[in-house]
Amino acid sequence: MAPGIPAAMERPHFIGIGGAGMSGIAKILTQRGAKVAGSDAKESGTAEALRALGATVHIGHAAGHLADDASCVVVSSAIRADNPELVRAAELSIPVVHRSDALASLMGGLRAIAVAGTHGKTTTTSMLAVALSELNLDPSYAIGGDLAGPGTNAAHGEGQIFVAEADESDRSFQKYDPEVAIVLNVELDHHANYASMDEIYESFETFAGKIVPDGTLVIAADQPGAVELTERVRALSSVKVVTYGESETADVRVHKVTPRGLTSEVTVILNGKYLTFTVSVPGRHYAHNAVAALAAGVALGIPAHNLASALGKYTGVKRRLQLKGEAAGVQVIDSYAHHPTEMTADLEAMRGAASDARLLVVFQPHLFSRTQELGAEMGQALALADASVVLDIYPAREDPIPGITSDLIIDAARSAGADVTAVHDKSAVPEAIAGMAKPGDLVLTMGAGDVTDLGPQILDHLSS
């Protein structure tokens, strides 16, 4: 057995290996010496990167892609039961392992930091990975997005710390046993898996209950859902609770957030002392993410002033207010925001960063279930833009729901006074935006689907 590899992970086969969470685990395993294989629906830069590390990546799903000697088949909740490789695994009696169990096995014996919350997980996990690397602690990390600097979403480090994004969407974050857990916020989302806020709270309580004895829960002091969760977990006497935020009762208090163009200067009060550092992305919510990262690092025993300085080296994550380029005096920025709270935060951040600019948004709703439940709130968020183009719903893993379309969002946006245009043909968007944009404008492509592909195309049309 290769060092550092659980026996079941020596020859894993990943179905959907190109996904953000799946590819990260596959990368770490290849770096540890496992013989990794897998398949994905289409060719991608991620597939190429995995091949460069030594993994075998097939395009398309077929029973023949699964080797008879695979030690396990790794799946995410998005993989359907009739996937031919999953069916073949059953025929061969090859164990099927959920992505979260695979990740949990990689954390074994390490000091784990698990970052949870309805929003901000990728950014906060990334901030920690960058800062800890800057401090030469050589962490392992698994993130739901690519770091702008290293350009990767995961790495095996030789240090003792493992930083992981902990996904609540399918309750898989309950599989981890972290030394430090971060909860950024608690809101109702993932409506196909959670019927109520009570179910959400119960799930997060279970997650918090998995923190190792004498471990630490770092949790927001300002967000209502997090405050409610804090009250619920105070009874966990073996866990230390550290709150952060602008509340006067916060253990790590955000004293001031000062916008500096597309960056922010953050001052916190920690143990009665003021500490100021820079965050390279705009907006209060990103500043709060950085403070959560600071509090988590301190909980592991890292000096606060060292960590604060290292956090200043973070340069962003792809798709989190990522500048794609500028043409004809127009900046094009990409945002992964797809929940109304995220949309509002990113739009407010852009308003604060460039208050004199016109803000044009291309929004692609993500999931029919989310649109059904939150479409009105999405429309209200778009009222913060000067003008918006709304695309059809990106289905991802879901089948259509009768009567649920982007019109729910468009109607709500117009009721809120927003200037909104429906565009059903995605290929028509670059020309439409190029015709609307003027020098000095900001264009924001927004959503968790393939709307991100439009940024370069918009820049090409602006240049022509």
Image (cartoon, rainbow, N blue to C red):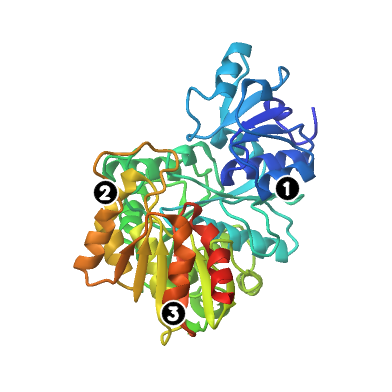
Label 3 Cα crowd, 10 Å radius (few <14 / some 14-19 / many 20+): some
Confirm or deny contact between disc 2 and disc 1 (CB under 8 A).
no
Label 2 Cα crowd, 10 Å radius (few <14 / some 14-19 / many 20+): some
Q: Position of residue 456 (x, y in %)?
A: 58, 65
From where the camera sits, is residue 454 visible? yes
Kindly identify the amino acid type of the residue bearing the numbered disc 2.
Answer: Glu
> Residue 15 versus residue 121: which sits nearer the camera?
15
For the point 74% across and 50% down, the residue is 157
Q: Which residue is mark 1?
A: 49
Q: Position of residue 210 (x, y in %)?
A: 48, 40
Position of the N terminus by quadrant: top right
> Residue 155 versus residue 266: which sits nearer the camera?
155
| 417 to the left or right of 352 | left
Q: Which residue is mark 2?
A: 373
Name the N-terminal-most of marks 3 and 1: 1
233 to 267, vertically: above or below: above
For the point 44% across and 45% down, the residue is 208
